[in-house]
Image (cartoon, rainbow, N blue to C red):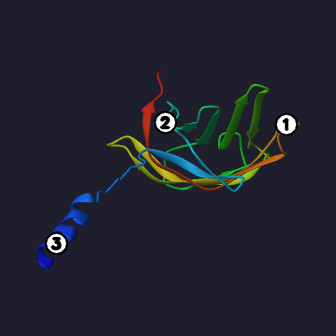
Amino acid sequence: MKKVFQSLLILSLFISCQEDVKFNTPALQGMKDNVFWRAIDSKATLAANGSLEIVGYTSNEKLTLKTTSTAAQIYFLGTSDSKKVIYELTDSSGTIIFNTGFGVGDGQIVITEYDAVNKTVSGTFKFNAENTLDNPLAGPVLNFQQGVFYKVPVSSQAQ
C-alpha cells in the first residue's frame, strides 16, 4: 500500500507540472536609464534608397533607430543625420524628444542579421541621446544600454 501511495504521489507531481513558455519574437528592448524597457510592438521599414528604420512602441513612447542600409555592420551614432536614434515620450504635459544626429549624442546600432527571405532584422544598440529641445521635465541625456532588436519584421516603403 505504501508503494502505491508513493507511486500516486510521484505521478501527481509529474501531471501537475507544466511549462509556461512565452516567446518574445519579435522583440525590441533594452535598459533605459538603468530600468528595463520593452516595446509592446515593433516594426521596420526599408526605404527605396536602402536605408532602414526600426521602430518600437509602448503605450506612450516611440523609439526609432535609423541606419543607412541593412548590411550587417556597426552604425556609429552622433556622426551623421542619416544614422540616428529618436526617442519620444508623450504624456499629458506634452512630448519630450531625445535624439542623436551629427554632433549630437553618441552610441551605436549593430545589425547582426538581415534575413531577406523572411524579411526580418536583428541586432543590438546602445546610445546617449540628448534632450535637444531642453525640455525641463526631463534630464539632459537619455541612456540606453544592452538594447536588442530580434527578428523585427521588415516591410518595404511604398514608393
Q: Is there CB contact under 8 Å for labels 2 and 1?
A: no
**Image point (53%, 46%), residue name:** 28
Which-is-in-front pick, marks 3 and 2?
3
Amino acid type shown at disc 3 = Phe
Q: Residue furthest front?
A: 1
**Image point (63%, 35%), residue name:** 62
Q: Is residue 128 left or right of residue 39?
A: right
Q: Is residue 77 left or right of residue 121?
A: right
> What is the x, y in percent for residue 85?
67, 42
Q: In this view, does 47 lie to the left or right of 32?
A: left
> What is the x, y in percent for residue 139?
84, 45
Callout 3: SS: helix
Q: What residue would you read off at disc 1? A: 137
Viewer-nearest residue: 38 or 63: 38
Amino acid type shown at disc 2 = Lys
Callout 1: SS: loop
Q: Distance between the residues labelled 2 and 1?
A: 29 Å
Callout 2: SS: strand
Number of the label disc, if any, that sits on residue 5: 3
Viewer-nearest residue: 48 or 92: 92
> What is the x, y in percent for residue 73?
53, 56
Viewer-nearest residue: 94 or 112: 94
**Image point (70%, 34%), residue name:** 88
**Image point (11%, 73%), residue name:** 4
Within 10 Å of disc 2 (Cα), the crowding (few <14, some 14-19, many 20+) is many
> What is the x, y in percent for residue 125?
60, 53
Quarter location, residue 99? top right
Instruction: Say if 66 sits above or below 90 in the image.
Output: below
Within 10 Å of disc 3 (Cα), the crowding (few <14, some 14-19, many 20+) is few
**Position of the N terminus by quadrant:** bottom left
